[in-house]
């Protein structure tokens, strides 16, 4: 709307360009009118969808859902559309009140839309700013806000090897039910001051994950070609290698040390 007033002001300033005594000088305004009408045609005719939120800078939004006419608990599939990615979560709704569905990290210029997939339930959405979701980030463990792992977000971990004998290492990934892929692709880089840099890419079947309760799974990424022999500090850089910018359902990334 502000842009319309500015353009209208430009139009008036072009129409009435100068005044000499009692004579009003009028300039041709065909080009200005054409520009004004072109801008009007380009403006959206419908309001911004109430189930979408546009981020003007990096932020985190809490997504709330309210369903009408819900008599008993039932599972619904929530679909998130953002950029070129489409993510899904299975959510249980049991009443008609507002319920927190997900904490979603957003980047500048992201537009996030939420909807119910194949559902006859009428849904309302609210995107609230409620602060940052507390996540764990320490030397050997990394969580992800909203269980979403961005492509450019590299998990940085540190290993303190104190034992004299050689050890093997596995990467451990915690999965939530929002992870709907059958395989996980990772790139792992190991850095040591004297042993140098080692890098490996791994493809792991999600069907091999261990079940932890009803929704959680633990996926181990075995790296048999690596043996840590020297004591000291090692650094790990772990990133996913999927085409999507965001992976949903990634709870955490960590590692475990094993005796060969």
Image (cartoon, rainbow, N blue to C red):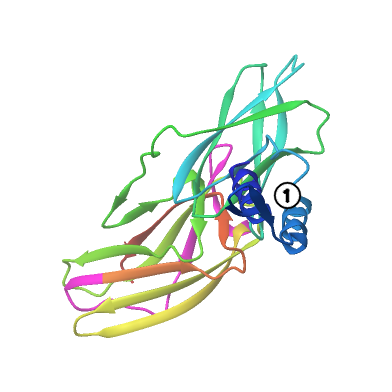
- Residue 87 in sight here: no
Q: Position of residue 130 (x, y in %)?
A: 43, 32
Location of the C terminus by quadrant is bottom left
Location of the N terminus by quadrant is top right
In this picture, is 253 found above or below 88? below
Residue at the spot 77% in from the left edge and 54% down from the top edge: 37
Asked whether residue 216 is drawn in magenta, I would say: yes
- Residue 237 in sight here: yes
In this picture, is 58 found above or below 243? above
Badge 1: residue crowd in 10 Å (few <14, some 14–19, many ≥20): few
Local secondary structure at mark 1: loop
Asked whether residue 147 is drawn in magenta, I would say: no
Front residue (pair 37, 113): 37
Residue at the spot 41% in from the left edge and 67% down from the top edge: 238
Residue under pointer 1: 43
Quadrant in which residue 168 is drawn: bottom left
Front residue (pair 248, 2): 2
Front residue (pair 73, 118): 118
Give, as a single range, the part of the protein colored magenta: 207-234
Judged left or right of residue 39, residue 139 is left
Q: Position of residue 179 (x, y in %)?
A: 61, 51
Quadrant in which residue 98 is drawn: top right
Q: Position of residue 18 (x, y in %)?
A: 59, 55
Front residue (pair 20, 67): 20
């Amino acid at each position: 709307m502000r842009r319309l007033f500015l353009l209208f002001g430009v139009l008036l300033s072009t129409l009435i360009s100068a005044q000499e005594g009692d004579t009003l000088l009028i300039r041709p305004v065909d080009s200005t009118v054409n520009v004004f009408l072109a801008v009007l045609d380009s403006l959206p005719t419908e309001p911004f969808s109430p189930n979408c939120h546009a981020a003007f800078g990096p932020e985190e939004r809490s997504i709330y859902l309210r369903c009408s006419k819900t008599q008993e608990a039932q599972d619904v599939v929530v679909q998130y559309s953002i950029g070129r990615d489409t993510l899904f979560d299975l959510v249980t709704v049991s009443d008609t009140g507002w319920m927190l569905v997900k904490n979603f990290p957003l980047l500048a210029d992201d537009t996030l839309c939420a909807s119910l997939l194949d559902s006859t339930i009428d849904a309302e959405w609210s995107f609230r700013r409620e602060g940052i979701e507390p996540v764990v980030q320490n030397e050997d463990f990394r969580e992800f806000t909203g269980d979403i792992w961005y492509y450019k977000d590299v998990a940085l971990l540190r290993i303190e090897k104190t034992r004299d004998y050689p050890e093997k290492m596995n990467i451990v990934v915690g999965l939530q039910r929002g992870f709907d892929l059958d395989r996980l692709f990772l790139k792992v880089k190991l850095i040591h001051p004297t042993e140098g840099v080692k890098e490996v890419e791994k493809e792991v079947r999600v069907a091999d994950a261990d079940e932890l309760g009803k929704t959680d799974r633990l996926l181990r990424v075995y790296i048999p070609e690596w043996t840590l022999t020297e004591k000291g500090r090692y650094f790990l850089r772990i990133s996913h290698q999927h085409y999507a910018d965001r992976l949903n359902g990634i709870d955490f990334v960590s590692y475990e040390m094993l005796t060969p």
